[in-house]
Structure formats: C-alpha cells, structure tokens
Amino acid sequence: MDVPGQPILDIRAVSKRFGGVEALKGVSLQLHPGDVVALAGDNGAGKSTLTKIISGVYPADGGEIRLDGKPVHFATPEAARRAGIETIYQDLALADNLSIGANIFLGREPMRRVLGVLPVLDRKAMAAAAKETMARLDFHVDRLQAPVGRFSGGQRQAVAIGRAIYWNARVILMDEPTAALGVPEQRKVLALIRGLKKEGRGVIFISHNLQDIFAVSDRIVVLRRGSLAGERRTRDTSHDEVVKLMIGG
C-alpha cells in the first residue's frame, strides 16, 4: 500500500550515455498512483531512452530509480514486469496469429496436466482471463478466439493494455499509443488510459500529439536534448508554452 504522498515511481537524476552522445542528463520525475504523466519532446529529446531505462532495457549510467520508496535496478524487461512495470510500445509486441488470451499470457502461459503427468496449455484458463480482462475494459469483439491480427489498431491497443492489467501492472509506460490511429480509435485509447487512472495505476504517456497529451494527462514533463526542459500541471499550461519548452524558445 502506498504511503500518502509517496510516489510509486521516483526517477532521480538519471543519466545515460551512448558513446560520445549524452542521451539523458540528470532527468528526474515522479509518478503517483492514479497519475498520468505525459513525456513531451522532439525526436532525440530522450523520451524513449528514459522509458527503456525504467523498463529494464537499458541500464542507467547515473542517478537512481525508486519503486515504492525503495531503490531498484532492473537488469531485464522481465525483472521490471515482475516488479509491476509494463511497457506498451508503438508496435505493441503482439503475436498477430494468436488469440487475445494467448497474447495476454505470451511467455507466461498457464499449464495443466493431462492424466496428472503430461503438461499442456490451459486454454480454458486463457480464454476465461481474456473474457474477464476485456470486460473490464468495456472491450467487445465477436470472437475472443480470433487472431489479434484481424483487429483494428485501437482494438490491438486494448489487448496490450489488457495484458498489463491482467498482470496487475501498477506502472504502465505507453510509447505513442495513438500514433497511426483514426480519431474514433484515438478517443477509445484515451478512454482506456482514463480507466487506468481511475484504477489507481500510474501511466507515463509518450506522444507527439499535444491534443492527446492535454486530453489525458495530469502533468507534462518536457525533455529537450536529453535534459529536463520543464514540468507543468496540464491544467495550468498551454500548447504554446509546451512547444516553447520543447524548442527552447
């Protein structure tokens, strides 16, 4: 249980270098339960590098990450997932030929034993999990067993979010979740993010779309050339101010 006022995730002066390039320069941010923090910045600002450090893809070269007030070091994305941090990348990392249930359990499949000996996939448990999780998201498709490759972009985002919810992620990193979606599907994804907020999950939301950022976030953290250019409460700022922070004007 979170101590009142204590962030779920506390990023303290994190830095990262790739050869001669300093990709992150002492960036800090906090994420609280039910908090949606948008990461804004131009290409090369350091947004994806920061999320990859949080999710265990890259090690930080300096600084500290605290989860529930305790220092953590994630050597792999799997270690971050076990700690309750899930990442939803733009390409979603879904297996198009598999069902919703199979994608929810991808790499973590439940097994049952036939005749008490032979291990086989527990497809009934996977289907039940898919039905329950998608119902929580108010997600409706004709056949839960259909390959997710047949789904629309917004529906596929729902499957990826459902996977994070099923595994009880408390911190969800979303990299450009509305990119390449039509307006109705963008609205659906933003509604899903608001649902995560209501459940008390913390969301870090990367987007180039300022309209989406202002529609869903509580705070906006702007990165520029690997540095923290500014942080604003969404309700207290404007599109123009955020753009000026991004370009340094």
Image (cartoon, rainbow, N blue to C red):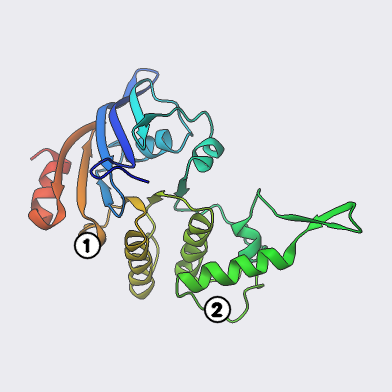
Marker disc for residue 183? none
User: Residue at label 2?
Assistant: 141
The picture places residue 93, in percent across and down from the top left corner, at 55, 52
Q: Callout 2 environment at 10 Å: few (<14), some (14 to 19), or many (20+)?
A: few
Say whether disc 2 or disc 1 marks the residue closer to the N-terminus: 2
Is residue 226 shown above or below 222? above
The picture places residue 168, in percent across and down from the top left corner, at 49, 53
Disc 2 and disc 1 in contact, CB within 8 angstroms? no
The picture places residue 195, in percent across and down from the top left corner, at 36, 65
Viewer-closest of 1 and 36: 1
Is residue 248 shown above or below 172? above
Viewer-closest of 142 and 117: 117
Q: What amino acid is at disc 2?
A: Val
Q: Residue at x 21, y 55 (%)?
A: 218
Q: Secondary structure at mark 2?
A: loop
Q: Residue furthest top?
A: 20
50 left or right, relative to 152: left
Q: What amino acid is at disc 1?
A: Gln
Tell me the quadrant of the picture where the C terminus can be found: top left
User: Residue at label 1?
Assistant: 211
Give the tally of numbered discs: 2
The residues tagged by marks 2 and 1 sit, at their Cα atoms, a distance apart of 28 Å
Q: Residue at x 37, y 71 (%)?
A: 188
50 left or right, relative to 119: left
Q: Callout 1 environment at 10 Å: few (<14), some (14 to 19), or many (20+)?
A: few
Q: Residue furthest bottom?
A: 142
Is residue 56 shown above or below 188? above
Q: Secondary structure at mark 1?
A: helix
Is residue 19 shown above or below 168? above
In front: label 2 or label 1:
2
The picture places residue 62, in percent across and down from the top left corner, at 34, 20
